[in-house]
Image (cartoon, helix red, strand yellow):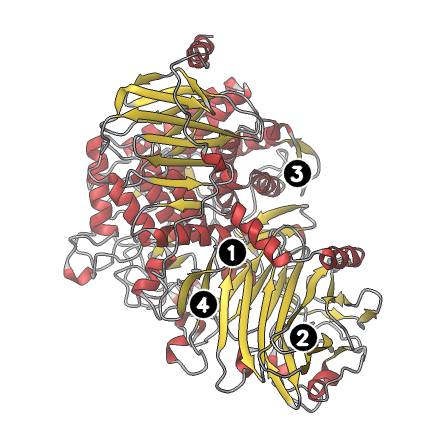
Amino acid sequence: MARRLVLAGALVTAVAVPLPAQAAPPLLSRDRSPSAMRSTHGSGHFGVWGLDRFGLPFYSYRMDEARDPRARQPELAGGTQAQHQVGNDHLMADAFNDGYVQLWSQDRLSQWANLWRPNDRHYSGGYGYLKVGRRVVSSLYLDRPRGSRFGRAFGVGYYRKHLRAAGIDLSQVVYSPYGDDPVLLDDVTLRNTTHRRKRVSWFEYWDVEPYDQAIAEPGTRGVDQPSYSRRTRTLEAAQTGGGYGNDNDPLWIFASALRGPVRGFETSVDAFFGSGSRARPAEVGRDRLSGTLAPPSSAGNPSNALFAFRAPVTLKPGRSITLRYVYGMAHRQKIAPLVAKYRRRSNPLRASERSWSRWLPKASFGPGHAWVARELTWDAYLLRSASMYEELCGHHTITQGGYYQYYFGYNLGFRSWPHYMLPMAYTNPALAREILRYAIGFQPAPQVNGAQFPYGSGPMCERVDLGTSNDLDFWLLLAAGEYGLASRDTKFFDEQLPFKSAGGTASAWEHIKLAYQHQESLLGPHGGYLTGASGSTGDWSDFSTEFLQMTESMLVTAQLAYAYPKLAELADLRGDHAFAQQLRASGARNVATLRREWTGRGWYSRAYSGARQVGQGVIFGEPQPWAILAGAPSAAQARTLVGNIRRFLDGVDAPRQIHGPTVIGSAITPARNDPGVTERGPTPGDSLFPLPDFFGAENQRSTMDNASEWVGGAWFDVNGWLTWALSTLEGKVPNARGLAWSEYTRNTLANHATHFPNHWDGTISVDDACEAFYSKETNFCGVSLTTSYAGQITEQPTWMVMDAIRLAGITPTQAGFRIAPRYPFRRFSLRLPQIGIASEQRRMRGYVTSLRGRSLQLVVELPPGANRRALVTWSGRRRVRHHVGGGTVTFTLATRAGKPADWAVNWGGKTR
């Protein structure tokens, strides 16, 4: 009752009242100015960053991978493939520097539609052939005309190629249209650059080689005989078998000519290539397509099919024509509507890029930081375009990508999905809810004793279990608290969601409470959380049970010490005060545990192995950020802890043999040869695995190379936590803002490409980890599980976006939001779809979007030097009363459900 009276009093004193007239500041939610992000910094040696005609970043790939030795990459065992993620909310395609495009679908299986298999004359597609007189010009970079200038650009949702040959200027853009359609579009523009009329033919080529990538049952799928509809100018072929055995309703592969003439089609690999070559297929050389319908192929064998269209055109001097095609995977009944939809669109590329532009962050970080704003935009694209729709789950999710998804074929792991949701709560609440539904669906029913969430998921929405992990509930609890407080969407938690494996439903809130109960059932004797019996993979650091002999995790204790009180705020917002009290008690107990785990060396312990404390003589990076976020250290302890992080994990002022300081992100554990380390774990040996020495401390391409303890290396997840934690130490640790900004920017792609310019992995995307500063090959990224795929993992972009929000000082609370910017400069702006903030001269303004439509309390931290007597606070265009105290100003913001609510604070005086 007392809390209600206080809140009611705050509302009364903060309502709009007549005050002396003063012009309201401009509404930030209506600011349409672009990001200040024009910069080529961080381009590396493969190409150069630029802005396209839509004002969005793109990477111009300029290296000749066939001749330049720098193109050979160690992560690919000397391979030269460099791919770019072209995706929307439904699927993803890989666009390669060699000029082809592979389409990936996760609707049912984890599969490619058109895997590159050159030995079987399957070349993926996404390119074509221009026939001019007797000459054949390919838009595949590998077969480009000798001496031609061939441009390649990796953009937001597209892959653009450009070349000039035989008097024709050819521009080809393959793109995945913004939204939720399972298609790629291909715009081909031909322009006559001569003074004479040109008669040419364009041959659009897409391959049909469906391949199930799931590592348990990989292989080609069967393809039925293709068919052609003259009315809709559409080719389609059914998948008939192979791959995961339970797929009894496989998708169809299709292509259609949307714009431009069609004078012939082809579906037969043998007929199309004939006695010709990839560079000059026989039918292209003859300037005709035979219309052959390829015979069916069986699972495990190469497909006999491809899709090709011929478009003969006549171009007057200086004139051009744009042809358009669609290629995709869908159930047959959905193909015709998709084709019709995009046939009606006049300029789907422009519409797609404008939609991306409206959604992507708009940021300005001041002079010299345009590259950071560019990277934030790019990383937000990488994060959103990693979205996938899984038909049997019935929901979208965001996948970890990289070798986990596109080589092993699994959506790993469960803990990843909820943390990808964190920035979506501020940028796309609908997708955030989808991720929560997707994750919750895998929860075992309460009557299934001892069961837990799976390690990940695989084809056909089935569980993938890899031992047991003791932190999976935490990630769902963290995500639920963030989503509910950020969006104010308390109704979502009343939604009935299934227990997929056992049947039955419960409200989302009951699922959350069940996760809490299961998490607490793992509480161990030292106040950590038990990792389980034999077969456990531990916590966030997979295999820590095996390599650390960990039985009880203090990392999870630290994580829950932060998450429980935040979830308690949501519980109070929902009126579940009993659960809120329970959460706060558990959180307080965990904080007390952490304080007991403060070691004599000046950090928090990592774990227990039976009765033995792990982490007395060596600092582990994983638990430290969460302990800080939970408020465990005193000011003096925080200074000591940060000093140890810099000394042991950054290599600052370390002995010379450590080779510090780091030029990229912080290491997760110190160097094995650091004389300050007095505790070293066993070296993972080959006897543990029927595999090469992936993890050994002497493997120069392992994160364990010269690491004192498991897992070694620099991990983007952990450094994302660390950036956030450092930003909260204002007033406790000198230069906390600068340290947080340093960690943030050192984990950027641009920084990696600057220090390792010959390394593609880390230029436009990156793996989940890179070698630490103390390793022999500090430029190497990845965990060495395969040399078939590199880059494109979603951890780095997730935390670049989330930490931009954290550094802007945005913290959702039960009452509303606390705004306490932590960038190391006073002037900046950050605009996201659901929230924004601009810190300006003598003014701060912003907007929030509540899905509930009730008044919110804003607590805004004032900069030093602000004249508090001159303060004016605004709710929209109306002045409102406020309260000043403790260096903050508090006022009430009126909101409407689903609409941005603008606010502003003006002050006098000279800030610094």
The residue drawn where x is 21% and y is 52% is 677
Q: Is residue 799 above or below residue 495?
A: below
| Mark 3 and mark 4: Cα distance apart in space | 47 Å
Q: Which residue is mark 2?
A: 205
**Does label 3 or label 2 sit earlier along the sequence?**
2
At mark 2, the secondary structure is strand
**Does label 3 or label 4 sit earlier along the sequence?**
4
Q: Quadrant of the C terminus?
A: top left
| Mark 4 and mark 2: Cα distance apart in space | 24 Å
What type is the residue that disc 3 sits on? Phe
At mark 3, the secondary structure is loop
What type is the residue that disc 1 sits on? Phe
Judge depth for marks 4 and 2 and give the one in front. Answer: 4
What type is the residue that disc 2 sits on? Tyr
Identify the mark at residue 54; answer none if there is no mark.
Answer: 1
At mark 1, the secondary structure is loop
Q: Position of residue 292 (x, y in %)?
A: 81, 80
What type is the residue that disc 4 sits on? Ser
Identify the mark at residue 78; answer none if there is no mark.
Answer: none
Label 1 neighbourhood size at 10 Å, few (<14), some (14-19), many (20+)?
Answer: few
Q: Is residue 626 above or below residue 104?
A: above
Tags 1 and 2 in contact by the CB under 8 Å rule? no
Q: Which residue is mark 3?
A: 499
Q: Is residue 118 left or right of residue 74?
A: right
Identify the mark at residue 60; answer none if there is no mark.
Answer: 4
**Does label 4 or label 2 sit earlier along the sequence?**
4
Judge depth for marks 1 and 3 and give the one in front. Answer: 1
